[in-house]
């Protein structure tokens, strides 16, 4: 069983791991010849299935295993994130699967210019500028060993990505920083107002999120004492691509979103045409942590059922092979 | 009657706060020891495995006045809770945030007259806008215990800018427990690790193991034996390094061999800091018969007379001198040693640890027949006598603390009650 690669895009990888860390402590990581997949299935809350295209992050990627060159690992995200953070200023970083004392490890080797060089070379410059000559040998090597568990194929074969009916509404979300600051505010207000009335302490505040096929998104919260809502208009509802659907144009005709287009309007004032979900405020706050990646987010609303977010990693090419998929169930009340 | 008063500038007061918060990471209370020309603040941690001391020289104070008629040794010692002091000497950061009125001067006095309340440590903060804050803390008169460290025995030493060490500490997992330091092939390596969790389920909760390798040229000076692994606590290391970095000082490390203490020392502007830390670890390099290879940025001035194998074999012959009331040290040590032996980094060193029991290398077994070096014996102990003017006292010394690697003999020792030093018995007759 072999895996090693150079980490080419350390910043993105670090942010990627950071956004996953907020959802759960341990991820199931599946490495194969085509991609790297991180999956987090917490006992409660949002599931993430994230796929990284190999060349989005890695270089010189080699993998080898008895099970058709697939390796399944259980990886603690906290330590992995911490290890990657120390690579942020690196000149080179690589990752490999290894074993020490019979414990499998993801070993991350980081090479960076010697620490404190900045200060030293600055002072040398004052003396007459012999700063850079030594820098090649002045390298610091940092090795971070993240303990992992290897999962056998039989252990993971029963785990499948959730399936969901066709969404009623799909929409591109506004910048997540906007959305996050508003939803965080709502959740906080709801938590505070509830602590006064002191009831239903087991259930967190429920955000109500809805969208229509005319570029409107509504985010609101309701407590006994008050009701608040924010409305975005003029957002994009991306067109469905017939080539991605089995039935082609005909299926688009039948698609729930086509029907939803007939209802409601672009000003968002009509009560018709909304697909609505109820989310746990705290859980949503964790999901929003993915905003740090700065990717495009498409939200698919299945009315009263689920919300699915597709977060695409920004890439120079148009391929968008790397994406994080969040499956969020809607609460009934 | 004791008279102790001193005055601090705002800057010195903030530096005192930094020193106190560093001491607070080692222990709950800080011991003061005043002499006519210096004030020493120190803490010995509860397991007696780490000792930190800050020597404030006259230059640190804008005024310093000490007079004592108590005791022949002309010292005044007391102990105060760190927390209480920390709330008095606020940090620079708190001041910058505007939480406190700016201090203009800080006056400290000790009150020990029978007429008034005794044992009061009085701090007067003279602030802007005519505000004066007076704090009265109660102190406890105690005998201060200092850890003695003989730098002459510490043949391994290095000096490095604190900024380097701070960066190393930043890479370590906050949960990591131990730090292994060694030199090899022109590089010095710092490895933070934690005792291994064997259950497969909890493997994922295991903290990161971090290795940082730097070129010896990054050190201002480096002369330490190659492949000599010295293991200290990450937490103590971090406490020392973080403080050294606030002073922007060069940190010197002195150590002899695993199981003997390591000292980190740095100083700036009349403030001398010393941390003496217990170590574990082992030596996996060539034995003494081989050419001793010392990683050095400078020609070696002394031979390696204190390699681990050397001291170990000696101990098998001699009964170590008694160490009254340092059971805790032994425990702390054993803890460190045990962790070390099962730690990942130790895997290669296992062999040499086990060598104590069965597979004794030829070189070592041969050493058993060497005559004991009597001069080296009799240096550890609680120095209860007050006739040693050169050292703060009472003290305990480092030079005879048993090696943590020497588990077998340690276990044997457990059954032996402490006895008196021979030199003291002579005094009786």
Image (tube, rainbow, N blue to C red):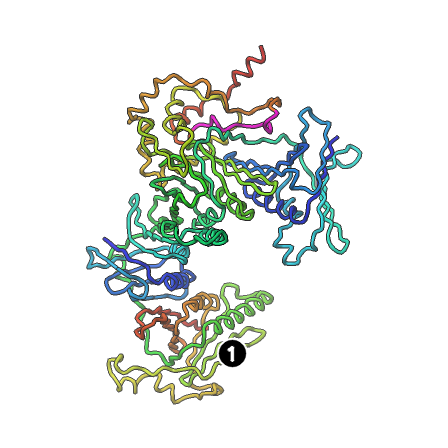
Image quadrant of residue B102?
bottom right
Residue A117 position (above or below residue B5): below
Where is residue B375 drawn, in percent x and y?
Answer: 46, 19
Of residues A159 and B342, which is closer to you in this image? Answer: B342
Q: In which chain is the residue bearing label 1?
A: A
* Residue B137 part of the magenta-drawn span: no
Q: Main secondary structure of the magenta part?
A: loop
The residue at the point 65 percent across, 47 percent down is B13
Which residues, given as a range, are shown in magenta? B389-402
Image quadrant of residue B72?
top right
Where is residue A66 drawn, in percent x and y?
Answer: 19, 55
The residue at the point 26 percent across, 86 percent down is A249
The residue at which mark 1 appears reads as A230
Image quadrant of residue A48?
bottom left
Quadrant (top left, top right, bottom left, bottom right) of the C terminus of chain B: top right
The residue at the point 43 percent across, 73 percent down is A332
The residue most toward the right is B115
Judge whether residue A114 can be spotted in this image: yes
Mark 1 crowdedness (10 Å alpha carbons): few <14, some 14-19, many ≥20: some
Where is residue B180 drawn, in percent x and y?
Answer: 40, 40
């Amino acid at each position: 069983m072999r895996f090693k690669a150079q980490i080419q895009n350390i910043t993105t990888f670090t942010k990627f791991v950071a956004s996953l860390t907020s959802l759960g402590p341990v991820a199931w990581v599946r490495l194969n010849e085509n991609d790297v997949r991180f999956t987090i299935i917490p006992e409660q809350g949002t599931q993430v299935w994230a796929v990284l295209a190999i060349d989005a992050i890695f270089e010189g990627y080699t993998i080898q295993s008895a099970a058709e060159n697939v390796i399944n690992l259980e990886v603690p995200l906290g330590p992995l994130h911490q290890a990657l953070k120390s690579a942020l200023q690196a000149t080179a970083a690589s990752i490999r699967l290894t074993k020490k004392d019979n414990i499998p490890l993801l070993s991350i080797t980081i090479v960076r210019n010697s620490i404190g060089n900045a200060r030293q070379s600055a002072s040398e410059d004052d003396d007459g500028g012999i700063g850079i000559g030594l820098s090649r040998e002045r390298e610091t090597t940092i090795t971070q060993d993240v303990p992992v568990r290897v999962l056998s194929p039989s252990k993971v074969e029963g785990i499948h990505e959730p399936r969901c009916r066709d969404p009623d509404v799909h929409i591109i979300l506004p910048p997540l920083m906007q959305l996050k600051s508003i939803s965080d505010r709502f959740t906080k207000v709801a938590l505070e107002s509830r602590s006064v009335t002191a009831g239903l302490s087991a259930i967190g505040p429920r955000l109500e999120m809805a969208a229509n096929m005319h570029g409107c998104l509504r985010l609101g919260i309701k407590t006994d004492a008050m009701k608040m809502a924010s409305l975005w208009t003029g957002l994009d509802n991306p067109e469905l691509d017939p080539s991605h659907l089995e039935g082609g144009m005909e299926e688009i005709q039948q698609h729930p979103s086509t029907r939803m287009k007939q209802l409601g309007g672009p000003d968002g004032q009509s009560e018709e045409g909304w697909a609505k979900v109820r989310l746990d405020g705290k859980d949503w706050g964790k999901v929003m942590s993915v905003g740090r990646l700065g990717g495009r987010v498409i939200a698919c609303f299945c009315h009263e059922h689920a919300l699915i977010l597709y977060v695409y990693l920004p890439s120079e090419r148009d391929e968008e092979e790397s994406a994080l998929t969040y499956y969020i169930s809607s609460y009934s009340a | 009657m004791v008279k102790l008063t001193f005055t601090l500038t705002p800057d010195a007061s903030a530096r005192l706060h930094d020193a106190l918060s560093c001491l607070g990471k080692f222990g709950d209370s800080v011991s003061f020891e005043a002499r006519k020309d210096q004030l020493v603040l120190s803490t010995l941690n509860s397991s007696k495995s780490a000792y930190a001391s800050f020597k404030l020289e006259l230059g640190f104070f804008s005024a310093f006045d000490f007079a004592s008629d108590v005791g022949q040794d002309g010292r005044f010692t007391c102990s105060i809770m760190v927390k209480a002091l920390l709330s008095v000497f606020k940090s620079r950061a708190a001041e910058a945030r505007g939480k406190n009125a700016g201090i203009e001067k800080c006056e400290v006095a000790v009150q020990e007259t029978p007429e008034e309340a005794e044992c009061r440590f009085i701090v007067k903060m003279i602030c802007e806008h005519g505000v004066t804050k007076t704090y009265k803390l109660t102190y406890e008169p105690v005998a201060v215990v200092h850890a003695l460290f003989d730098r002459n025995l510490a043949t391994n030493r290095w000096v490095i800018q604190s900024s380097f060490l701070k960066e190393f500490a930043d890479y370590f997992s906050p949960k990591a427990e131990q730090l292994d330091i060694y030199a090899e092939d022109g590089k010095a390596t710092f490895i933070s690790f934690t005792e291994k969790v064997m259950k497969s389920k909890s493997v994922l909760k295991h903290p990161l193991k971090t290795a940082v390798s730097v070129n010896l040229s990054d050190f201002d000076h480096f002369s330490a034996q190659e492949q000599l692994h010295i293991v200290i606590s990450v937490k103590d290391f971090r406490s020392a390094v973080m403080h050294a970095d606030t002073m922007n000082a060069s940190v010197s490390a002195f150590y002899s061999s695993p199981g003997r203490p390591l000292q980190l020392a740095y100083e700036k502007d009349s403030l001398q800091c010393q941390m003496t830390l217990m170590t574990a670890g082992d030596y996996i390099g060539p034995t003494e018969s081989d050419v001793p290879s010392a990683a050095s940025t400078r020609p070696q001035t002394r031979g390696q007379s204190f390699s681990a194998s050397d001291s170990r074999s000696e101990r098998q012959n001699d009964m170590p001198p008694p160490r009254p009331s340092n059971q805790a040290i032994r425990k702390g040590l054993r803890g460190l040693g045990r962790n070390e032996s099962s730690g990942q980094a130790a895997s290669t060193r296992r062999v040499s640890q086990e060598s104590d029991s069965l597979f004794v290398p030829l070189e070592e077994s041969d050493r058993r027949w060497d005559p004991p070096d009597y001069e080296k014996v009799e240096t550890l102990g609680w120095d209860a006598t007050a006739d040693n003017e050169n050292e703060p006292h009472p003290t305990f010394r480092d030079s005879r603390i048993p090696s943590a690697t020497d588990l077998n003999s340690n276990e044997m020792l457990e059954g032996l009650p402490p006895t008196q030093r021979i030199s003291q018995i002579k005094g009786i007759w």
